[in-house]
Structures are given as structure tokens and as C-alpha cells.
Image (cartoon, rainbow, N blue to C red):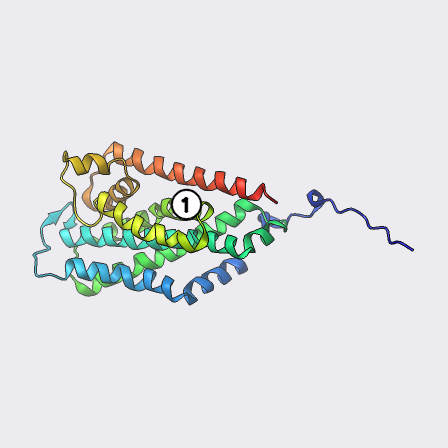
Amino acid sequence: MSTVTTPVDPTARRVPPLGGFSLTVLGIELRRMLRNRRTVIFTLIFPAALFFAVTGSDKTWDEPVGSGNEAAYILISMALYGAALTAAAGGSMVAMERALGWSRQLRLTPLNPVVYILMKAVVALVMGALAIAVVNLCGVIQGRAEMPTDVWIASAVVTLFCTFTFAALGVFTGFVVPGENAMQILGPGLAVLSFLGGVFWPLTEGSTLWHIATFTPMYGVAEVARSPLTHDLPWYAVVNAVAWLAIFVAGAAWRMSKDTARV
């Protein structure tokens, strides 16, 4: 006697509200990130150590820059670097999940792929906010950075939104390269882009390096992040920031569609 089975139509599955977006999953993801020692080093220790290393010398940091001083300029730059590194690391976790087969299992569920990427971006943003908060707290404790309170808050908020670019870069890289190689590429790569983008020291406008920097991903967001302090935001810096955000988001969406098409 044979048993007759009824075919299952996967398109008839009930999609959960909000495409599967869940605060519980977000909380689990955040706790998982914070349990990772390497992530904690990148988020809480490395950006702060860089800030103290750059501004810890006997050099006078009181040179005026916009509505603050040179130490404030460095503080915003280091907060951006730390947040970018952290956000990219969070986004690149996609690569590790793909290697373990977790993302393939998720694609067998009604979870919307866009919501899946959105939750990754939110986690990366929260981790970036932690990096920004730690660097700013170090600046307050050290006492060399000076700028009005509203400029301090505005620069931190703008820097946080700038990390979207690098969260998208992390997701894009996570879909392109094998899991174990994602941060090996992103770590040194972001350091090089930060040098080129004038994050570690101001670039001389009109120089050969400055002309090259205006086409690299870190230049535009660095100018945007520091604009509340410097009160100077060239149009080509805005175009640079928007263009690279669009490129990385489009790249991540393209690779995600290719990846999901295999199931």
C-alpha cells in the first residue's frame, strides 16, 4: 500500500508580518556580536587607542578649525574610522553565515531577503554607534577636543549615518568573497582608504593625492562627517558620498539576488 503525498507550493507560504523583521532576532544578533572578542576590540578598544595615539603627543592641538580646534577634527575622523570598520565587520558577517550554510537555511523560510539585509544593516549601525560613543567619551575625558555641544552632537549623528556606506560595503564584500577572507580584505582596505580619504591627516587641496582622494569612498563621508565642525562641505564631496553609497547598496542587492536565485 503506497502513501500519496500532496505537493507543497512554496509560494503559498504565509509571510510573517513586516517580512519577518523581529526585534528578538536583532537582540540575539547584537548579543552575538558583543560576545565576539575580535568585534569588541575593533569596536571599543581600537578606535579609542588610535585617537589617543594621534592626539597623545605634546603637539599643540589648539589650532582653530571651524567652530572647534584641531583635536576635535581628529576626534571626528577617528570616530568615523572606528564606526566604518565596525559597520563593515558587521555587514561582512554575511560571508561567514554563507560559509556555514545558515543563509541557505534562512532562504528556505518565508523571511524576506531584503528584511534579512536590513536587520544586518541595523546591527552594523548599532555597533557603529558604540564605536562613535566610545571615541567621543575618550575625547571628553582627555579634554583636548573643544567644540560647542550642539556641534559635538551633530557631528556624532552625521558620522553615524555615514556608516551606512560601510555597512553596505561589508554586506557586498560578504557576498563576493569567502567568509574567512572578508575581514582580511576589509581591514587593510579600509585603512588604505582612510589614508587616501584624509581621515588620518588633512590633505593639501590641489595636490596629486587630493585629486586621487576625491574619487575614493572615504573622502566624501569624511567631509560630510566633519562639516558640522568645519562649516565647509564642497559639492563634489556630497556627490562622492552619495555615489559610493549607491554603488555599495546596488552591489549588495545585486549579489544578494544572485545568491538567492540558487535556491
Give residue 246's quadrant in the image.
Answer: top left
As displayed, is residue 248 above or below residue 5? above
Residue in the image at 43% along x and 62% along y: 33
Please indicate, yes or no, whether residue 68 appears anywhere in the rendered image.
Answer: yes
* Residue 47 located left or right of residue 86: left
Q: Nearer the viewer, residue 51 or 19?
A: 51
Decide if residue 234 is on the left or right side of residue 205: right
Please state which amino acid type lies under the numbered disc 1. Ala
- In the displayed structure, 235 sits above or below 65; it is above
* Spot occupied by residue 196 in the image (x, y as percentages of width and height): 23, 43
Instruction: Judge by depth and name the residue closer to the eye, 74 or 133.
Output: 74
Nearest the viewer among 87 and 177 is: 177
Q: Name the outermost residue toward the right.
A: 1
Number of other residues with Cα within 10 Å of mark 1, as a class: few under 14, some 14 to 19, many 20 or more: many
Q: Where is the C terminus found, in terms of image quarters?
A: top right
Residue 175 or residue 231, whichever sits in front: 175
Pinpoint residue 209: horizontal percent, then vertical percent: 18, 38
User: Relative to 253, is 185 above or below?
Assistant: below
Q: Name the residue under label 1.
A: 168
